[in-house]
Image (tube, rainbow, N blue to C red):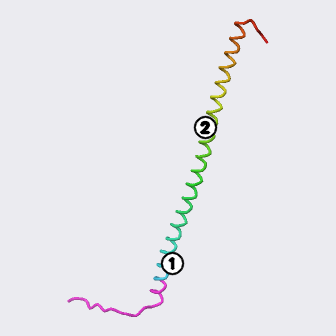
């Protein structure tokens, strides 16, 4: 013998609350994901700006190092030239 199943088309308050809760959870998840995505993009933009600033600083530092080396080479040449001519300061 097969059990007799019946379908009850009525909707009770528990089912309505369950549906509202499910829809609310999905909406909350969507908002949370969107907010997280925006937050992540803001952090990445900030990191990108920081990297640009650090790159600029490193380029300026390399230029200064090159100027210092050139100045040291000039001073060395002047020092050697002064020794050859017998001129001392």
The alpha-carbon separation of the residues under discs 1 and 2 comes to 52 Å
Considering only order in the chain, which callout, 2 or 1, is on the residue closer to the N terminus? 1
Total number of numbered discs in the rendering: 2
In what quadrant of the picture does the C terminus appear?
A: top right
- SS at badge 1: helix
Residue closer to the observer: 26 or 76: 76
Q: Is residue 69 magenta?
A: no
- Figure quadrant of residue 75: top right
Left or right: 21 as drawn, with respect to 43: left
Q: Which residues are magenta?
A: 1-17
Depth-wise, is mark 1 or mark 2 nearer the camera?
2
- SS at badge 2: helix
Residue closer to the observer: 56 or 38: 56
Q: Is residue 45 above or below residue 71?
A: below
In the picture of the structure, the residue carrying the numbered disc 1 is 24
- Figure quadrant of residue 56: top right
> Alpha-carbon neighbours of circle 2 within 10 Å: few (<14), some, or many (≥20)?
few
Residue closer to the observer: 45 or 59: 59
- The dominant secondary structure in magenta is loop
Q: Residue at x 74, y 6 (%)?
A: 86
Left or right: 5 as drawn, with respect to 86: left
Q: Position of residue 76 (x, y in %)?
A: 67, 16
Q: Residue at x 53, y 70 (%)?
A: 31
Q: Position of residue 64 (x, y in %)?
A: 65, 32
In the picture of the structure, the residue carrying the numbered disc 2 is 59
Q: Is residue 11 magenta?
A: yes
Residue closer to the observer: 29 or 69: 69
Q: Residue at x 62, y 45 (%)?
A: 53
- Figure quadrant of residue 4: bottom left
> Alpha-carbon neighbours of circle 1 within 10 Å: few (<14), some, or many (≥20)?
few
Q: Is residue 54 above or below residue 26?
A: above
The residue most toward the right is 89
């Amino acid at each position: 013998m097969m059990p007799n199943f019946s379908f009850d088309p009525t909707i009770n308050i528990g089912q309505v609350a369950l549906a509202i809760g499910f829809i609310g959870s999905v909406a909350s998840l969507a908002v949370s994901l969107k907010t997280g995505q925006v937050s992540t993009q803001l952090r990445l933009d900030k990191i990108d700006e920081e990297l640009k600033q650090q790159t600029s600083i490193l380029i300026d530092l390399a230029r200064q190092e090159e100027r210092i080396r050139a100045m040291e080479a000039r001073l060395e040449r002047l020092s050697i030239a002064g020794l050859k001519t017998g001129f001392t300061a």
